[in-house]
Structures are given as C-alpha cells and as structure tokens.
Amino acid sequence: MSMLHDLEEIERTVLTTDPSFRAIVRAEMDRHISEARQNALAGSKDAFLLSLMRLLALPRNGHTRLIPNNAISVLPFRFVSIGTGVRLLDAPSGFSEAIGSELMSINGVQVSEIEAAAEAFLAGTRQRRRVIGPILFAWPAALFRFGVFSGSGTISYQLRDATGRNSELVPDMNDKVPGAALYPRNEHGKADAFWSPKTYLEKRDFGQRGLLLVLPSFFDSGETDFSNAVSEAAECVRSRPDRRLVIDVRGNTGGNFLKTLPLIDAILEGSDNRRVGVLVDKFTFSAAIVFVAILKHRLGARLSLIGEEMGDGLTFFAEGGTLDLSTSGAVVRYSSAFHDWAGGRIDETTPREIAAEIVPVGSLELDRYWTVCSDDIEARDGFCREVLDSLNA
C-alpha cells in the first residue's frame, strides 16, 4: 500500500475535522500536502514523515501532531531536555561514561541552532517542543533535513559533563534501534524510556511540616485505580485540615481531570490558612495543567507554583483521538475540542462536562523556579521540606 493512503487518511480524518486547523490558510496547508505527496511518491518514508510533522505542526497546537516514534530508526542514544539543557540519559555500554552529560553540539552545530531549525516541525509551546524534540537529535534523517548531517559519513556528538569535561561520541551509523525503544509516545523525562507509574498516589508525611502528595499520572486504563487513589488522597487531606501540602505533578502527562475534582474539593474544605505548593515541569501536560489551573483559581494567593514552565499553555485544542497510519507506521494525534482556561471561554466544540468546569485563570506564573531530574527522590524530599517551611512563613 502506498504512503499516499496515509496522507489521504490525514486529509480526511484530521484536516477536515480538527478545529485547530480553522485558522490556517488553505494555501499554506496545500503547500505542505504537496510536499508530503511528492515524498510519498518517491518512496522516501523518513522525508514523508518529516513533511507530515511540518504539516501537522501548522496550528501550533501541541495536542495535534505526528508521532513518528514507532515508524523510525534512531541512533542508540536517549536525549532528554532537563532544565535548560539537553542531557544524555541512556546509551550503549561503550558510551555509558557520557550518561548524564549535556549535549552541546552535533557535527559541530550548536544544539540551539538545531532546535531553531526543528521548531517548524514540532507542535505546541516552546516547552512542549523541548519535550518532544530530542528524538530528532538521534534521527539521522531529521539531522539531514536540518543541514547538520550530509547523509553520508558519521554523526558526532559533543557533550560536557558536570565537571566541565568534554567528550565526543561517534556511533556506528549501522547501529540503529526503533525510535520507540528510547523515546516513549508520552515523554516523561525519566532515564528509563519504559517507565510507568507503579502507583497513582505516593504520600510522604513530614509531620508538622506538612504532607507531600505525588500524582504521577491521571491516565487509568482500568477505570477504578486512579479514582481510588484520588479518594485516598482526599481522605488523607481531610484528616489533616490544617496541614500544609505539596503536590507533585511533574512528569504527569494528563488523563481525566474530572476525576481529580474530589481531591480539589477536599483541599478547599481545609483551614482558610492552608497553603499549598505545586511542583510542575515541562513534562506536566493537558489534564494535569487543568488540575493546577482549577487549584489556582480556587486557592488564589494560597497556592505557590514551583518548578518550571509547564508543557502547554492554558488555551488549546484537545480531546479528539489518534490515527494509526497503516503504511508508514506512525501515529497522528488530533484534536476535537476547544479549551480556554485563561479567559474561561468555550465554543461549540467544548464538551458539556468540561464547559461546566472551565474558569478564567488568567495565567499560571511561577512563584519559584526549581528543576531537578524527577528520578532524584532524595533531592525532591529535601526540597519539599524547604517548601513546606516556606509556606508557613
């Protein structure tokens, strides 16, 4: 089957139904459709996928995008955006000494230049692009498209470790792995690409200092485990009405925010003096952002937002579904509903149950910047003690 079939599926299912494309000039869409068609006819799968990425990034809506991970082969390095840099979090044994180092350049081209070249191919906000973009550093076809790799010879990676020592990695160009082996569809920022939460709720009681609640995900394929975790968290919060709280939603890529409302209600039932800190990062997405937005709207100045800018803004298109491209093997994520948690607006696409909860939050400005690898539990707990103390100040 021709890759043209994949393109036709996108035109039929996504471009005509996803409301985020309404603001895109048809001529601009047609130009990128034409490029994708030419690459499909030429049988160049990687070039075809890159042209689809460019097409689907046009609305700048992070919930609408091509996910190439299952369809491509990459060099065996896992790069992840940590803080303001890009770090190597996994590599074959021959390169393991460089794990943890920051990527500085590829073939002598600075990372910032590559990110600038990749911007048009990545959907969403700056932070979302920094989350989903690192797979491009390991994908030779993308580096070729960005002018970093000639298409022949080798690709060399220049890195710098925490001590300032420089190193260079030059992998065998034949040593490639499936993209999904190192880059998950829902990027969480952890070293283990196959990481998934062992529990929907982790509690740490710091005594009179306060309580930490870790909510790593709002997705629940079983339908009951997450609801049970929310009930447990709500009961815990109610039993400590005067206790200060820190809620960690770093790495939470979303799910169903409606199921979190009982926890929000329980937090509001506490003392009027209760203060709450929320830890967020660029891997905080979708329903997790909505959870934070509702908390901010209800708590006002009693909520402190700590970490780094989240992966999406407050105005976006979501819901929708996924489309598996049968020929190329890639996946398309598309949207169907408008959300505006900044201005509290809805339209005819906003589902009724969501429209009933939307509130005008305005903006979510950080009260304090903090970033550390979410695998570092000791650093997190130490920081939480400090945050809880500051909430009492």
Image: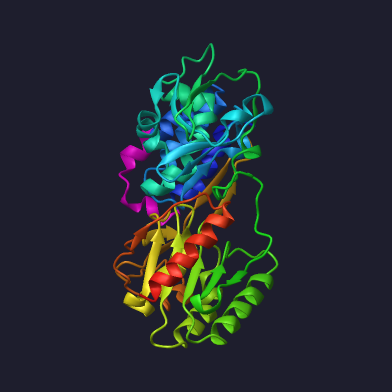
Examine the rendering and report whether any part of residue 216 can be seen. Answer: yes
Q: Which residues are magenta?
A: 17-31
Q: Nearer the viewer, residue 95 or 130?
A: 95
Q: Residue 4, percent across and down?
A: 55, 33
Q: Nearer the viewer, residue 102 or 328?
A: 102
Q: Residue 161, percent across and down?
A: 49, 32
The extreme top residue here reads 153
Residue 377 magenta: no
* Residue at the (68%, 73%) spot, across then down: 224
Q: Quadrant of the N terminus?
A: top right
* Residue at the (43%, 71%) spot, across then down: 389
Q: Residue 346, percent across and down?
A: 36, 70
Q: Nearer the viewer, residue 382 or 230?
A: 382
Examine the rendering and report whether any part of residue 329 can be seen. Answer: no
* Residue at the (57%, 87%) spot, across then down: 239
Q: Main secondary structure of the magenta part?
A: helix
